[in-house]
Image (cartoon, coloured by chain):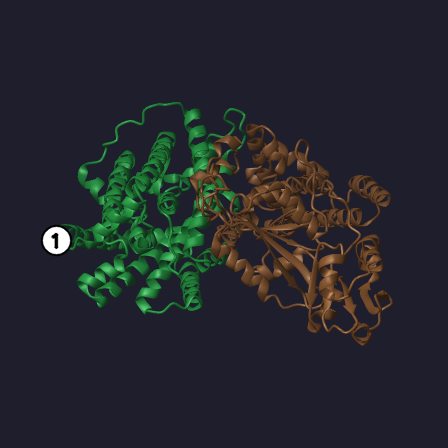
Chain colours: A brown, B green
């Protein structure tokens, strides 16, 4: 068929483009598809077999209504032919008809939903999203079987045509927020969106900001809980990470595990996480400033201990700490990138050989190693903030070494203010503490039992504040 | 969009303002001017400050959308309003200079004796400039966020100091006659009068239910804590009090190693450093508003360059140490108090009594009812 050859030419006659012709009731039928992205078994069972068995009049309408056993089937015009073939559809042509049938028997290799490595739980659900947006939709649908759940699809990227799906509850989410999100997605003009992180750059008003402005998770239970608070969730095909909007920094101190354990324990652990953020960021800087400038405020016994271990070092305290920090950061990168068995070997070399031998050789001091190690370990109390905390640790170390404690306090004030200037989607980043929202403190640094959280967070504009509502009403 | 701050944020600003210039040099000055009666001077000035704050809040209720400038402009004309704001601009500039000098003196005495004015300015000015550049709203949120830590730190300092001393007598408070006490109040009014910013920011404060009660609860609590600090300070140092120029640090340092807590002066250091950053940013925001009203345009870059220039000039070339600026303020700024303590309150009282225009009041009540 001429049109089939034309389509083949238009998609550059790639080796995975397959054309299959049949003669049924003296009429020629042609199928064109990409053999790499279809379910061959389904193709045979639901399209080829019924066609071969069919003895009646061959028209597109007859085939669509009486013969083909495909769920998604649509009649399309010539202008959409190429677009649908490259979007992994099977096109069916009948001799003498200008239109075609577009059939969905798409198949990609995907993995099964499994526990995400970024957020393991002890007592909660272990399902996680996969790279397929269809799985994401299915998992959210499973958790939210309500008519109010709205799913909207967008296709973005001139070359990738990536599917972006947004989810919200129409009886809860703020209309302005939805409009803003849709407007931003529609405005994206790029070749490719390969992952959720690509999308974030287009959604943000301050893409260059140091701090995160969007919630990101791999867990359906977290996404569902956030949608139920009136937030909007965004899934990108090809990424297991679902974005939630609006976002507050407090969310990174929360963990899905928190809601499956005792409220008192959760509150305690959240304090530990907050302390972890402070320690991860300022401890090396504070230690350095104490050693260099403010030894008067350190108790005498500590000064003597530190002095005993550092007096013969060849480097200044600043260079020493900077050296240890860079060394640890390199070891961290190596252990991430290398295969697991090699990573283990480098960890041993780094920790034992470099660390221990360095101290024994008198090149670095044990307090320096302890301080940096403490700071690095503390960072993983809030793993989502690890990239930011890593940068801030360096910043505070430099400030501590040059401007002392006064500089460190100044930098802390500056960064808190910086967080306060970020009002992505009109939501204060440090809520419920700045501004203080009494109602939302129930799930802030401390958590009340779920039965006491009768209202949704006030900081997120939503249509119905009360959690007791019947969403199907 | 108009930048608005909440009543709680205003209350935090008020509380931080109370702390900023009263933790370091003021207690020794109070003792220097009127020995043990310094506590009486402090009480008198706090009461006067409260009355002033009450007046500002009352006017806020009557004219919810007007700041001091709009009120003066409405009743006394634009020129008078601009002249008044020029005075207030000068007042805040000197307050900021005093804050810088007190901060530097504290740093050198307690934290780092090698800290130079240049390093201090290089650290301090960029931060308060950034806070001003970020806008009043984010600055207020930052203060609100930090206030909890300041409060907890301050309470820890006082609690440990008081526990170590035990509750004892301070002796007679009225060792000076009334005339001397009034003179001391007159001389030291610069270290008080902290709530003037409420009149400047009045149009930016959101109207909420129980506004006065909320703000006063913060203010009274902080004043109570300050009075405890002064009480401890006076009892601790007695006749040598005037020698201890860094009150909060001296009080906590003197009482180190209480209950195995080790050095607690680090707590007081952190409290004070946070306070001066927040207070500096509040002054910068007030200066920005005054600048806009005086010159009638809103170019933030011009303002920041000009203000930083003036501050560097004043602190580096004119008032390069705490003694210089304290001497100048004691000599001349007491007369400025006349404007602040007499003229502005007088105008406000007249407005409250004689301006029968009730529409603002009704609007306030309407909004309050809704809330």
Does B323 sit left or right of B39 as displayed?
right
Farthest residue toward the front? Answer: A56
A89 or B125: nearer the eye? Answer: A89
Task: Give the vertical position of B259 relative to A426 (above or below).
Answer: above
What residue is shown with label 1? B354
Task: Give the vertical position of B301 relative to B222 (above or below).
Answer: below
Residue at image position (77%, 74%) is A96
Does B102 sit left or right of A280 as displayed?
left
Please indicate, yes or no, whether residue A316 appears anywhere in the rendered image.
Answer: no
Quadrant assignment, res A281: top right
**Residue B94 locus on image (x, y percent):** 35, 56
**Residue B202 locus on image (x, y percent):** 30, 53
**Residue A385 locus on image (x, y percent):** 63, 47
SS category of the residue bearing label 1: helix
Please indicate, yes or no, whether residue A96 appears anywhere in the rendered image.
Answer: yes
Residue at image position (81%, 59%) is A54
């Amino acid at each position: 068929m001429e049109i089939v050859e034309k389509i083949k030419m238009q998609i550059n006659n790639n080796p995975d483009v397959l054309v299959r012709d049949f003669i049924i009731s003296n009429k020629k039928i042609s199928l064109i598809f990409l053999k790499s992205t279809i379910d061959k078994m389904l193709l045979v069972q639901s399209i080829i077999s019924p066609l071969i068995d069919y003895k009646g009049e061959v028209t597109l309408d007859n085939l669509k209504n009486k013969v083909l056993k495909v769920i998604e089937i649509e009649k399309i015009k010539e202008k959409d032919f190429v677009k649908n073939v490259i979007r992994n559809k099977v096109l069916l042509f009948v001799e003498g008809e200008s239109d075609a049938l577009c059939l969905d028997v798409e198949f990609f290799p995907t993995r099964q939903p499994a526990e995400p490595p970024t957020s393991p739980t002890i007592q909660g659900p272990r399902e996680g999203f996969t790279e397929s947006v269809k799985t994401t939709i299915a998992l959210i649908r499973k958790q939210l079987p309500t008519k109010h759940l709205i799913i909207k699809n967008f296709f973005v990227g001139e070359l990738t045509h990536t599917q972006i799906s947004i989810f919200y509850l129409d009886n809860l989410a703020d209309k302005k927020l939805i409009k803003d999100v849709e407007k931003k997605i529609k405005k994206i003009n790029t070749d490719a969106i390969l992952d959720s992180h690509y999308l974030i750059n287009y959604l943000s008003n301050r893409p260059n900001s140091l701090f995160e402005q969007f919630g990101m998770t791999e867990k359906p239970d977290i996404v569902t809980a956030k949608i139920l608070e009136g937030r909007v969730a965004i899934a990108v095909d090809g990424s297991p990470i679902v974005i939630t909007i609006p976002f507050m920094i407090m969310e990174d101190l929360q963990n899905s595990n928190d809601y499956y354990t005792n409220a008192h324990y959760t509150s305690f652990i959240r304090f530990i996480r907050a302390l972890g953020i402070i320690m991860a960021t300022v401890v090396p800087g504070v230690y350095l400033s104490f050693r260099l400038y403010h030894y008067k405020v350190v108790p005498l016994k500590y000064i003597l201990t530190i002095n005993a271990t550092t007096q013969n070092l060849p480097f200044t305290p600043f260079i020493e700490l900077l050296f240890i920090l860079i060394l640890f950061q390199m070891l961290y990168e190596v252990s991430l990138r290398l295969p697991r068995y090699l990573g283990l070997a480098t960890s041993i070399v780094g920790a034992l050989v470099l660390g221990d031998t360095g101290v024994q050789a008198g090149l670095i001091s044990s307090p320096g190693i302890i301080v940096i190690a403490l700071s690095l370990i503390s960072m993983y109390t809030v793993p989502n903030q690890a990239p930011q905390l890593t940068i801030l640790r360096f910043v505070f170390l430099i400030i501590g070494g040059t401007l002392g404690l006064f500089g460190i306090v100044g930098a802390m004030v500056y960064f808190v203010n910086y967080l306060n200037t970020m009002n992505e989607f009109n939501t204060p980043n440090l809520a419920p503490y700045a501004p203080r929202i009494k109602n939302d403190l129930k799930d802030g640094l401390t958590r009340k039992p779920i039965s006491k959280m009768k209202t949704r967070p006030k900081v997120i504009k939503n249509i119905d504040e009360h959690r007791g509502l019947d969403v199907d009403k | 969009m108009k930048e608005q701050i909440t009543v709680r944020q205003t209350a935090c600003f008020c509380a931080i303002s109370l702390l900023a210039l009263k933790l370091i040099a003021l207690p020794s000055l109070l003792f220097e001017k009127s020995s043990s009666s310094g506590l009486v001077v402090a009480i008198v000035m706090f009461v006067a400050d409260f009355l002033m704050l009450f007046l500002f809040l009352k006017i806020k209720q009557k004219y919810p959308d007007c700041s001091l400038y709009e009120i003066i402009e409405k009743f006394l004309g634009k020129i008078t309003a601009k002249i008044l704001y020029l005075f207030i601009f000068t007042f805040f500039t000197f307050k900021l200079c005093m804050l810088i000098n007190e901060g530097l003196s504290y740093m050198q005495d307690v934290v780092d004796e090698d800290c130079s004015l240049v390093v201090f300015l290089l650290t301090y000015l960029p931060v308060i400039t950034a806070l001003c550049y970020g806008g009043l709203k984010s600055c207020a949120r930052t203060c609100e966020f930090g206030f909890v830590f300041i409060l907890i730190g301050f309470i820890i300092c006082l609690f440990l100091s008081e526990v170590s001393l035990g509750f004892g007598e301070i002796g007679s408070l009225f060792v000076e006659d009334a005339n001397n006490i009034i003179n001391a109040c007159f001389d030291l009014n610069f270290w008080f009068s902290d709530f003037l910013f409420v009149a400047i920011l009045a149009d930016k404060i959101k109207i909420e239910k129980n506004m006065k009660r909320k703000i006063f609860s913060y203010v009274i609590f902080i004043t109570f804590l300050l009075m405890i600090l002064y009480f401890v300070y006076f009892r601790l140092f007695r006749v040598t009090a005037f020698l201890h120029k860094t009150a909060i640090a001296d009080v906590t340092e003197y009482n180190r190693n209480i209950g195995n807590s080790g050095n607690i002066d680090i707590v007081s250091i952190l409290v004070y450093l946070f306070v001066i950053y927040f207070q500096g940013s509040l002054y910068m925001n007030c200066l920005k508003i005054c600048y806009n009203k005086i010159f009638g345009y809103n170019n933030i870059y011009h303002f920041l360059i000009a203000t930083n220039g003036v501050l560097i000039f004043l602190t580096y070339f004119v008032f390069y140490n705490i003694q210089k600026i304290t001497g100048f303020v004691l000599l001349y700024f007491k007369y400025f108090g006349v404007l602040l303590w007499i003229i502005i309150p007088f105008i406000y009282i007249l407005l409250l009594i004689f301006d029968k225009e009730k529409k603002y009041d009704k609007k306030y009540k309407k909004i309050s009812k809704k809330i």
